[in-house]
Amino acid sequence: MSEIKTDKLTGVGTAGSIVVTGEGNSTTTNLQQGLAKVWTRFNGTSTIAVNDSLNVSGLTDHGTGDYQVNFTNNMGNVNYAHTANSNNALALNGNANSADNLRVGTYDGSITLADSSRVFSVAQGDLA
């Protein structure tokens, strides 16, 4: 098996675009478009705290079950995809996206905002 070690990859046609052949060799995907640009796992109870993250500068607690994930590097626009989950029944992005943060709401089984000890959030799209 061959091994390639590098600190930087640059596309030939477009510097920020690298196409990767997918499984089965029948499709391709743009490497940059397929990467998560923001992700975090955090504790949303008591004093909220990030357990681990990428491109997250901090959290804001807006009340019971209502969290804001602040980005270190902004998204290119507000049209990115965001998913969230928690150890409660449901986690939703209830507010409009912003280029510099996203909001997550965690709910219990009766669809009432409730704090969650494990919240997971991922955003995909273009960075600014």
Image (cartoon, rainbow, N blue to C red):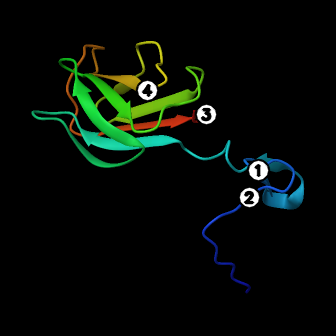
| Mark 3 nearby-residue class (10 Å; few <14, some 14–19, many ≥20) | many
Q: Residue furthest left?
A: 46
Residue 87 can be seen, yes or no:
no
Q: Earlier in the sequence, mark 1 or mark 2?
A: 2
Q: Earlier in the sequence, mark 2 or mark 3?
A: 2
| Mark 2 nearby-residue class (10 Å; few <14, some 14–19, many ≥20) | few
Q: Are marks 1 and 4 in contact (CB under 8 Å)?
A: no
Q: Does residue 37 appear left or right of residue 26 in this picture?
A: left
Q: Does residue 83 appear left or right of residue 81 in this picture?
A: left
Residue 42 can be seen, yes or no:
yes
Which of the image's four quarters has the C terminus? Answer: top right
Q: Earlier in the sequence, mark 3 or mark 1?
A: 1
Q: What is the spatial separation of the Cα atoms under label 4 and label 3, in whole angstroms? A: 13 Å
Q: What is the spatial separation of the Cα atoms under label 1 and label 4, in whole angstroms? A: 25 Å
**Type of amino acid at the residue the image marks with label 2:** Thr
**Type of amino acid at the residue the image marks with label 4:** Asp
Indicate the position of residue 39 as horizontal and vertical percent values: 43, 42
**Type of amino acid at the residue the image marks with label 3:** Gly
Indicate the position of residue 102 as horizontal and vertical percent values: 41, 25
Report helix, strand or loop for mark 4: loop
Q: What is the spatial separation of the Cα atoms under label 1 and label 2, in whole angstroms? A: 5 Å
Residue wearing tag 1: 15
Q: What is the spatial separation of the Cα atoms under label 2 and label 3, in whole angstroms? A: 19 Å
Residue wearing tag 4: 100
Q: Earlier in the sequence, mark 4 or mark 3?
A: 4
Residue ID at (37%, 26%): 91
Residue wearing tag 2: 10
Q: Are marks 2 and 4 in contact (CB under 8 Å)?
A: no
Q: Are marks 1 and 2 in contact (CB under 8 Å)?
A: yes
